[in-house]
């Protein structure tokens, strides 16, 4: 399992692996929004929590098809499926690798983009906490979508169509935590809901994703 | 004699052939009857004549949710028993459900404009219907994208299971999200019970009509799917020969 994780991370950090692509996308989005809605603090600050969360979600979506597509092309996915490692565990490791290469950089760099979007300082810890809690769910749900569309020739657009409705609860609670943090309100309730969703997703989705992979590798 | 005998497409085709004209006939009678009777009801003293759209809106909204539940059951039957007619029925039901959701959203907008002064409001009920519509679109697109019919049935089945959980989750997440921001004027079963019987009986008739209409369309579409399968099998045999 660790070997698989290290292999995936190494592939992602080498040239053309797309490591950091999510953060770059996030930067572009954060730079474009002020041009779209106007640069003054009064208009930016209220929308910042939502924009940051939507940006993180889209950045995550951007790199989803990498989870299985390349391995499917060169046949190493078939090897993984026949290896002694259960396919469910392989899916979980792949989602973890995706989170380390996409989600974790987003979590770390989010305060920087929060500054760009005039997010109040007291909301920063909540932004980081909600992203740290929510992005693993995004990666795991994305792995499910990628597993469903792995055999398809033009699966990219279909992948986003399938995954976006699944992302809605995570987005709602994540943005809610940040918004409440910005306004200095209690954040415990949405925080618990988000944690519940993430844990539920981490526990159950690997089975669904592995089932979809088995169908596609049949 | 058990329902599993209908896994045999030939038996399914023979049974539904006799059933279909009766179903179509009663669906048309109930739909037209319910809507026309609803249209002839007196005007509501507060909402005026706009209340009459309820006879399209409520049955469509009810069917939109129930068709997804039916697809969930059909997907489960396919996954557990490999019941081909069941998978094809789920496939056939999805576009009907999507159209019902669209009808509910559209009539809701037409009704909402004079009542609330807006076409669209991010009310929990409206938003979760929009999400339901997205689920339908994704499901239909996945059926269309996968070439091998058995893989497509498996993949859409898994998607339907996961999607059902998340449709439910989104429903409550959306409720949470908009709490305290906007108290939406919503249509609920409770308000149906407060409705006077002048409106209630035509509404029940329209609901029955929409249900029969769904059954009739479902059978027609499933029969088409079975015929399409048979055609594909014949063509494959032709290619081999």
Image (cartoon, coloured by chain):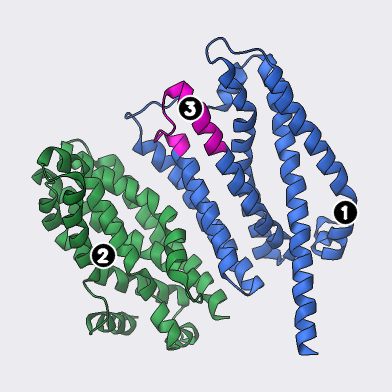
Chain colours: A green, B blue
Residue at 24 percent across and 49 percent down: it is A51
Q: Is residue B200 magenta?
A: no
Mark 3, other Cα within 10 Å: few <14 / some 14–19 / many ≥20: some
**Residue A6: x, y in percent?**
27, 82
Which mark's residue is nearer the viewer, 3 or 1? Answer: 3
Q: Earlier in the sequence, mark 3 or mark 1?
A: 1
Mark 1, other Cα within 10 Å: few <14 / some 14–19 / many ≥20: some
**Residue A24: x, y in percent?**
20, 67
Q: Name the image quarter holding residue B82.
A: bottom right
3D distance between C-alphas at marks 1 and 2: 55 Å
Residue highlighted by disc 2 = A103
Which mark's residue is nearer the viewer, 2 or 3? Answer: 3
Residue highlighted by disc 1 = B17
Q: Can residue B81 be spotted in the picture?
A: yes
User: In the picture provided, is A43 more to the left or to the right than B81?
Assistant: left
Residue highlighted by disc 3 = B112
Q: Which mark is residue A173?
A: none
Residue at 37 percent across and 37 percent down: it is B176
3D distance between C-alphas at marks 2 and 3: 41 Å
């Amino acid at each position: 399992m660790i070997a698989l994780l290290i292999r995936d991370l190494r592939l992602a950090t080498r040239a053309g692996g797309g490591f950091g692509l999510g953060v770059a996308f996030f930067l572009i989005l954060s730079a474009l929004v002020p041009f779209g809605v106007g640069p003054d603090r009064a208009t930016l600050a209220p929308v910042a929590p939502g924009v940051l969360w939507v940006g993180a979600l889209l950045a995550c979506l951007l790199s989803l098809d990498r989870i299985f597509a390349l391995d499917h092309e060169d046949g190493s996915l078939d090897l993984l499926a026949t290896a002694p490692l259960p396919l469910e565990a392989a899916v979980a490791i792949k989602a973890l690798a995706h989170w380390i290469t996409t989600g974790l950089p987003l979590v770390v760099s989010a305060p920087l983009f929060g500054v760009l979007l005039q997010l109040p300082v007291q909301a920063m810890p909540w932004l980081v906490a909600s992203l740290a809690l929510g992005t693993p769910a995004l990666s795991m749900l994305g792995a499910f979508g990628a597993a469903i569309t792995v055999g398809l020739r033009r699966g990219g657009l279909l992948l986003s169509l399938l995954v976006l409705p699944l992302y809605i609860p995570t987005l709602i609670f994540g943005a809610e935590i940040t918004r409440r943090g910005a306004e200095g309100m209690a954040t415990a309730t949405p925080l618990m809901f988000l944690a519940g969703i993430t844990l539920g997703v981490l526990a159950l989705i690997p089975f669904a994703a592995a089932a979809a992979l088995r169908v596609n590798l049949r | 004699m058990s329902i599993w005998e209908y896994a045999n497409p030939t038996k399914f085709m023979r049974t539904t052939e006799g059933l279909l004209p009766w179903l179509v006939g009663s669906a048309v009678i109930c739909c037209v009857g319910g809507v026309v009777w609803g249209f002839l009801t007196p005007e509501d003293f507060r909402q005026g004549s706009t209340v009459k759209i309820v006879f399209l809106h409520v049955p469509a909204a009810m069917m939109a949710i129930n068709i997804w539940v039916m697809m969930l059951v059909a997907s489960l039957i396919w996954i557990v028993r490999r019941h081909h007619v069941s998978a094809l029925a789920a496939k056939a039901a999805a576009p009907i459900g999507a159209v019902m959701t669209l009808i509910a959203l559209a009539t809701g907008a037409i009704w909402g404009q004079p009542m609330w002064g807006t076409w669209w409001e991010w009310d929990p009920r409206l938003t979760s219907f929009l999400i339901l519509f997205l689920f339908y679109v994704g499901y239909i697109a996945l059926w269309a994208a996968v070439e091998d019919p058995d893989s497509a049935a498996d993949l859409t089945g898994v998607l339907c299971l996961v999607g059902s959980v998340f449709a439910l989750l989104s429903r409550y997440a959306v409720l949470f999200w908009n709490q305290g921001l906007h108290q939406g004027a919503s249509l609920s079963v409770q308000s149906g019970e407060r409705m006077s019987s002048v409106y209630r009986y035509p509404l029940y008739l329209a609901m029955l009509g929409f249900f029969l209409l769904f059954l009739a369309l479902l059978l027609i579409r499933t029969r088409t799917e079975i015929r399409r399968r048979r055609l594909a099998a014949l063509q494959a045999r032709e290619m081999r020969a």
